[in-house]
Image (tube, rainbow, N blue to C red):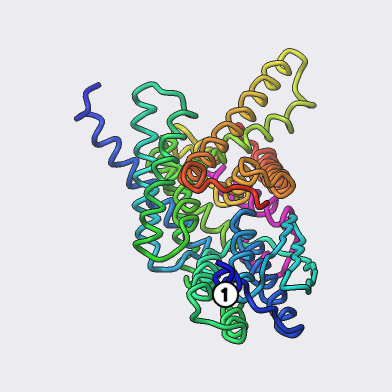
C-alpha cells in the first residue's frame, strides 16, 4: 500500500482517537485550557501507532512508539499550557489502553468452568494470550510516556 | 568558604512552623494520591513543598492508602501519617498542586498562603456540565467502536448504551456505592443496551458494540499509573493499582457476561 492511500485511514483514526480522548479528558476533569492539547496529542499518538501497525509492526512496538511520541510532545505541551505533563500524557494515552483485551481475558476466565472439555484448552490459551498482550501494551504505554523522565531526569539517591 | 556554608544552611523552624509544614505537605500529597497522580510525583511534590517552606529534608513513604512523612529542620524532626481514602481522577487538582509547589519554590507563597490555596484546591469540582460529560463519554465509546472497525449502526448503538451507562454510573457514584458494584451494574446496563444491536439485527458486527460500550469503565489511569509506578520502583503502589485495575476489569466482564446471558446474544 502506498503512503497516499493510507492517508484517509490515518485521518479517520486521528479524528476518532481525538474524540475518545476528549470524552475521557472530561471524565478526568482536565483544566479546560488543556483540552485541545489532549486531543491533538491523542490523535498524533494513535495515528503513529496505526501507521506502524499498517507497516506490519507488532502492536506492542507500535504502542511504544506512539506512547514515546506522546511522552515527549507532552513535555512540550506542559510548558506551553502550564500544566504537568501527566495531564496531557495520561489522557491522550487512554485510546491506546487495551481495555477490551483486559475484559476479554476476564470474560474467558469466567467462561472456562462451564465450557466443554474440548474447548477449555483453546479458551485458556486465549486468556493467556490476551493477558500477556494487555500487560505488554500497558508496559509499552507506561515506558513510552515516562521516556522523557527515564532518559533525562536521572537522580542519584540521596547520600 | 565557611561563610558561604553558613548562609546556605536554613534557619531551624519553630515548632509551630514545623507542624504547619508537615501538615500542609501531607495535605498536598493526599490530594495528589486521591486524584490520580503516580507515586513518584507525590514524593517529588511533597519534598519540594516541604523544603521550599523551610525544612532541611523530607522523608516520604507513599503507600496505596497511607502517606507517611518525616520533616527535619535543624535538630528537630516530626513524623506524621495520613490515611488517604477515595480513588478519583481529577487532573485539575493534580495540575493546581503542581503549580502551587512551584509558586512556593519561587517564594511567592508562605505557609499561610499555602493553607489558603490548599483549601481552595480541595474544593475544586468538575468544570464540565454533567450532561456534557454524558454526551462526550457516549461519543468517546462510539469513537472506540469506529476504531475497532464498527459500522454506523454500531456507532449509534454504542453511543446510546455508553451515554445511558454513564448516567447510571454518575447516579450510583453520587450514592457512594462500592466501586466494583458500580462497575458491575454499569457494565450490565451498557451490555443490555448494546445487545440490542444483535437482537434487532442492526449490524453485521454487533459484538463490536458490546466491547465498545463498556469502555467508559476501563480503569485507564489505574492501569497506566500501575505500570509507571512499577517501572520507577514504587512496587507497593504499583502492585495495588494493578490489582485494582484487574478487579475493575473483572467487574466489567461480570456485568457484561450477565447482560449477554440475560439477552441471549453471542458473546465476544
Magenta-colored segment: predominant secondary structure: helix
Residue B117 shown left or right of residue B178 in the figure: left
Badge 1, how many Cα within 10 Å: few under 14, some, many 20+? few
Q: Is residue B83 rendered magenta in the image?
A: no
Q: Nearer the viewer, residue B227 or B115?
A: B115
Residue B146 shown left or right of residue B87 in the figure: left
Q: From which residue to which does the magenta span run?
A: B169-196
Q: Position of residue A72 (x, y in %)?
A: 40, 46
Q: Position of residue B83 (x, y in %)?
A: 78, 66
Camera sees residue B255: no
User: At 41% across and 23% down in the image, what residue appears?
Assistant: A57
| Chain designation of label 1 | B
Q: Nearer the viewer, residue B24 or B21?
A: B21
Residue B156 shown left or right of residue B220 in the figure: left
Camera sees residue B132: yes
Label 1 sits on residue: B7
Q: Nearer the viewer, residue B259 or A91?
A: A91
- Quadrant (top left, top right, bottom left, bottom right) of the N terminus of chain A: top left
User: At 77% across and 63% down in the image, what residue appears?
Assistant: B68
Q: Position of residue B209 (x, y in %)?
A: 50, 41
Question: How many callouts does the rendering have?
Answer: 1
Residue lying at the far top of the rendered structure: A118
User: At 34% across and 23% down in the image, what residue appears?
Assistant: A55
Amino acid at each position: 500500500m502506498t503512503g497516499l492511500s493510507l492517508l484517509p485511514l490515518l485521518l479517520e483514526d486521528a479524528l476518532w482517537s481525538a474524540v475518545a480522548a476528549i470524552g475521557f479528558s472530561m471524565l478526568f476533569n482536565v483544566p479546560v485550557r488543556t483540552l485541545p492539547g489532549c486531543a491533538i496529542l491523542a490523535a498524533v499518538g494513535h495515528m503513529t501507532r496505526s501507521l506502524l501497525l499498517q507497516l506490519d509492526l507488532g502492536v506492542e512496538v507500535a504502542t511504544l512508539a506512539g506512547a514515546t511520541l506522546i511522552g515527549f510532545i507532552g513535555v512540550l505541551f506542559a510548558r506551553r499550557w502550564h500544566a504537568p505533563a501527566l495531564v496531557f500524557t495520561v489522557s491522550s494515552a487512554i485510546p491506546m489502553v487495551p481495555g477490551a483485551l483486559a475484559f476479554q481475558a476476564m470474560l474467558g476466565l469466567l467462561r472456562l468452568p462451564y465450557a466443554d472439555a474440548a474447548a477449555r484448552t483453546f479458551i485458556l490459551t486465549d486468556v493467556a494470550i490476551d493477558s500477556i498482550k494487555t500487560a505488554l501494551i500497558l508496559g509499552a504505554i507506561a515506558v513510552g510516556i515516562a521516556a522523557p523522565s527515564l532518559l533525562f531526569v536521572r537522580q542519584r539517591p540521596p547520600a | 568558604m565557611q561563610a558561604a556554608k553558613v548562609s546556605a544552611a536554613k534557619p531551624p523552624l519553630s515548632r509551630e512552623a514545623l507542624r504547619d509544614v508537615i501538615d500542609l505537605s501531607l495535605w498536598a500529597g493526599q490530594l495528589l494520591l486521591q486524584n490520580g497522580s503516580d507515586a513518584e510525583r507525590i514524593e517529588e511534590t511533597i519534598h519540594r513543598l516541604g523544603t521550599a517552606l523551610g525544612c532541611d529534608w523530607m522523608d516520604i513513604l507513599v503507600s496505596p492508602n497511607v502517606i507517611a512523612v518525616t520533616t527535619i529542620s535543624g535538630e528537630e524532626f516530626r513524623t506524621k501519617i495520613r490515611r488517604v481514602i477515595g480513588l478519583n481522577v481529577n487532573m485539575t487538582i493534580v495540575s493546581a498542586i503542581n503549580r502551587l509547589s512551584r509558586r512556593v519554590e519561587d517564594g511567592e507563597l508562605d505557609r499561610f498562603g499555602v493553607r489558603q490555596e490548599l483549601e481552595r484546591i480541595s474544593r475544586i469540582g468538575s468544570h464540565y456540565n454533567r450532561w456534557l460529560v454524558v454526551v462526550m463519554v457516549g461519543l468517546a465509546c462510539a469513537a472506540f467502536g469506529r476504531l475497532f472497525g464498527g459500522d454506523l449502526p454500531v456507532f449509534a448503538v454504542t453511543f446510546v448504551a455508553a451515554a445511558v451507562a454513564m448516567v447510571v454510573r454518575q447516579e450510583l457514584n453520587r450514592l457512594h456505592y462500592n466501586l466494583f458494584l458500580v462497575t458491575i451494574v454499569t457494565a450490565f446496563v451498557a451490555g443490555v443496551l448494546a445487545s440490542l444491536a444483535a437482537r434487532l439485527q442492526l449490524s453485521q458486527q454487533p459484538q463490536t458494540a458490546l466491547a465498545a460500550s463498556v469502555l467508559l469503565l476501563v480503569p485507564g489511569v489505574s492501569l497506566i499509573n500501575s505500570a509507571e509506578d512499577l517501572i520507577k520502583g514504587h512496587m507497593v503502589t504499583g502492585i495495588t493499582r494493578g490489582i485494582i485495575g484487574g478487579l475493575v476489569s473483572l467487574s466489567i466482564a461480570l456485568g457484561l457476561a450477565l447482560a449477554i446471558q440475560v439477552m441471549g446474544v453471542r458473546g465476544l
